[in-house]
Each structure stands twice: as structure tokens, then as C-alpha cells.
Amino acid sequence: MSKIQGTLAQWRDRLRRKELSPAELVNLAADAIEADRATNAYISFDREAALRAAAEADISSPLAGIPIAVKDNINVLGQPTRCASRLLSPYVAPYDATSIRLLKAAGGIPLGRTNMDEFAMGASGENSAYGITRNPNAPDRIPGGSSSGSAAAVASATAVAALGSDTGGSIRQPAGHCGIVGLKPTYGRVSRYGLVAFASSLDQIGPMTQTVEDAAILLQAISGHDQKDSTSANCPVPDFEASLGRDVKGLKVGIPSEYFTSGNHPGISEAVQNAVKQLENLGAELVEINLPHADAVVAAYYIIACAEASSNLSRFDGVRYGKRAEDAAGLMELFSRTREEGFGPEVKRRIILGTYVLSSGYYDAYYSRAQKVRSLVARDFAEAFSKADIIVGPTSPSPAPKIGDSAMDHLQTYLADIYTIPANLAGLPAMSIPCGTVKESGMELPVGFQITAPHFREDLLLKTGFALGK
């Protein structure tokens, strides 16, 4: 299979030295996508549009004409945005998402719409109308989700880097399972304008890359205040690359007892502990902390996220855009048949749950209580960050499961996000980096090490990850 060997930073340097042109790199990437028969990482790609952009690329720009893969729920002008769903199969984006506009302004070239769990609902990469995405490290295992295609593309070297979205771990969990770097920025750091909404108070776009340095470069390009997004934070964007290489001596590293339990796979625990020891050897100070409401985060998340999904996905009615059921007898039949034919099982499951918890008589019992838990989780982190600079732990309690396992046990699939969900509930930045492997059925499977920082302190994530040599 063709591969694009090299990191984003390395390709940027090669382009600036004129060892090749942006068009040549686009063709290398497109050839790699066409040759990939193993991962199903892409739903579509447009070589000609990318080559037209490459002809205009400025190699002195921050991204120097490098092609970047894009998750299929982020709008790119003139390209299909399907969210891996039958319901949006005929839809073509009439505008660029702000993250894509900034990406282009920085010299990046969108190339390839990556596969995903439908409407970003899933943690496995199996809930797509366009087929299962496979883990490049073990084709019989999931890559994680919902940014499954973005993770698989970067891990299989059919993309230099990619954009994903993270609602409850959808960047970090597949990054951990595929052995790459995935960073969820602070809520509001990157505009959500042009991202198809799953849960508006939780969604965030972020980079998925081979290295921490690449994550810093890509995050720099897409960050910033946007008046088109009412939740966009109007705060300065620091030089993220400048945070790399700084000493972590004296950094207070929070070790939550709730993240280091016997419920983790033994190999996961060993790999994560080794990363913690490495930080200690670099001069960091380990601090024991507690996150008392950690056991309630999954329940609270699925109530809040599904409630917001129920509201957001009501716009897909067969009238305004996307699929429309044929020969419907009336408006209500048009609505119901369009959604029945267009939405997949996992999306329907979450819409039904979300509608239920918002319904009369159940709102206070479920949704209101979940929001109270969310406030308590945020308070737990505020207390923890009064003692520690960062918080670390495993990205996931187990290595990538086999394809098909999630269909047999939905609850276990939901619990796989137990360590990633808290950062979304609290709006915090968090990053997964590789920290070793575990052996399962004769295969070496990647382990993710998660770092969480206070609001708008992505520089701490990047500094720490870079110090660990990632």
C-alpha cells in the first residue's frame, strides 16, 4: 500500500526547501488513499479540487500547501458532507466551516472526507452507512470512534494529518487505539461554525496527527475567535509551537485514584505507569488528587448528549436538505419515513433516549440532575487544578476491542469513554499520546496516555507530550 512517509513538520520543511511541490504531495496523498484497501478510512476524496488549491498554495504559509484529511461532519465548500449517514447522502456543503477557512488561510489543503460513526454517535467506527473502519494495527479490531477514519488515515500514513471532532472522546479514544496523537481543545478555542452538531455544549474540533509537534502546528492554524459561533472564546491564541521543548521540571502532575483502578487492563496500567515514571524522571512532581464524581460521568454524559442530539437532529426532516422519502402521503409520514430510512440504529437509539429524558415528567428526574452532575464534575476539576498543573491517566481502560464486540454489549462500549468524557463535561483541553503497546491475541495494540489541563492551557498539554518524546 502507498504511504505518505513523514510528519507534517517534515513535509512543511521539504516543501519550503522545494524538494517537491504542493501538487506533487497532493498526488502522493491521493495515490495512497486510492491504494488503501484495508482501513476504509475515507468516504470520498477530490483529487482535482485539491490540485487546484495546490496550484495556488504559498509554501511560506504555516501549512505550506500540505493536504489534510477532514472528518465527514465538517463542511468543506463544494464537497459532500454526509456525516457517514444515508440521510445526508445527497448533501453538498455550500460553505466552508470556520476551521476549514482558517486551515486554507494557513496554506492547508482539505483532501479526503474521512469515515466516522454516523453523526459522530459511537466509539467504535462501526456505525457508518459507508462500512466499518478498521484499525491499521490490527484489521480485525476497531480503530475507536467517532473520528475513526481520521485516526485510521493518520495511523496508516494515508494522511499527513487530519481534523476530527470530539464530543465525549471522539478524537482522543481513536487516537489512543490507533497509536497517534489526538487533541481536544478547550471548548470555545476552535469555532464550531460549520461542524454538524451532535451535542452543541460538548462538541469541539481538533487535530489528529503523528506527533505532538504536528498537533501544535495544526491547532495553531485552526484556533481563534469567530463571531459566527456564539460559544467561541474571544481570547488570545498563544504560539503553541513555542511551548514545545520547555522543561517540565517542577510541573505538578495530578494522579487521580479514580483513573488508576483494577478495572483497567493490566497492560494499560503498566504502560501508563511507565509514562508517569518518565515524567517523574524528567523532574515533574507527582500529586495525588481525587475526582469524586468520576463514577457518574458516563450516565450524565449520555443524558445530556442524547438530549442535545434529539434537539439538533430534529432539523433532518426530509424538507430542507438531505434525503427525502418518496411518495409520502403527508407531512408526518414524510418526517417519519425519512428518519426511519435515513438514520442508523445507534442514532435512533440516542434520539429516542434524548427525547425521553426531555419529556414532561422526566426532565427533572434525568436531564436536570445530569446538569447538576456536570457542575459537580467541573467543581472537582477546579479543586484538582488548585493542587496540580495537569492531570494524567489512561485514555481508555482497555485496548481496541474486536470488531463486532460493541454490538453484543452496548454498555461496555459506552463505558470505554469513562476517562475521556469528563474533559468534555467540564470544557477542558485534553490530549491522548501513544505510551506503549499491549499484547493481545499475538498482536501489539497501542495504548493511549491522556493529559488534561486547565481551560485554555493547551500549551501545557503540548509541552508535556513533547517532553515524553511524542
Image: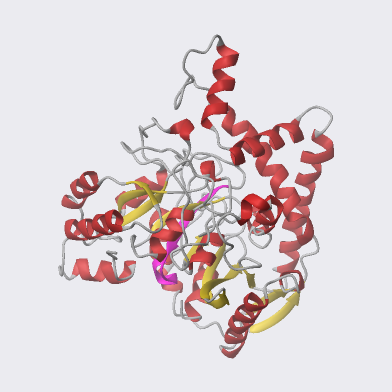
Where residue 394 sits, quadrant-wise, is bottom right
Which of the pair 221/396 is nearer the observer? 396
Count of marks overlaid on the render: 0
Give the magenta-colored segment's residue range. Answer: 203-214
Q: Position of residue 168 (x, y in %)?
A: 61, 53
Q: Position of residue 243 (x, y in %)?
A: 46, 73
Q: Position of residue 261 (x, y in %)?
A: 75, 73
Residue shown at the point (79%, 34%) measured from the top left: 363
Where residue 95 sits, quadrant-wise, is top left
Check residue 45 for magenta coloring: no
Picture layout, residue 78 above or below residue 249: above
Residue 300 at least partly seen: yes
Residue shown at the point (46%, 38%) measured from the top left: 228
Where residue 259 sits, quadrant-wise, is bottom right
Instruction: Answer left or right for 218 relative to 289.
Output: left
Check residue 204 for magenta coloring: yes
Instruction: Answer left or right for 387 relative to 459.
Output: right
Q: Where is residue 13 in the image (x, y as percent from the top left)?
A: 25, 71
Which of the pair 339/406 is nearer the observer? 406
Residue shown at the point (78%, 70%) measured from the top left: 290
Residue shown at the point (65%, 59%) measured from the top left: 416
Which of the pair 108/166 is nearer the observer? 166
Picture layout, residue 220 above or below residue 300: below
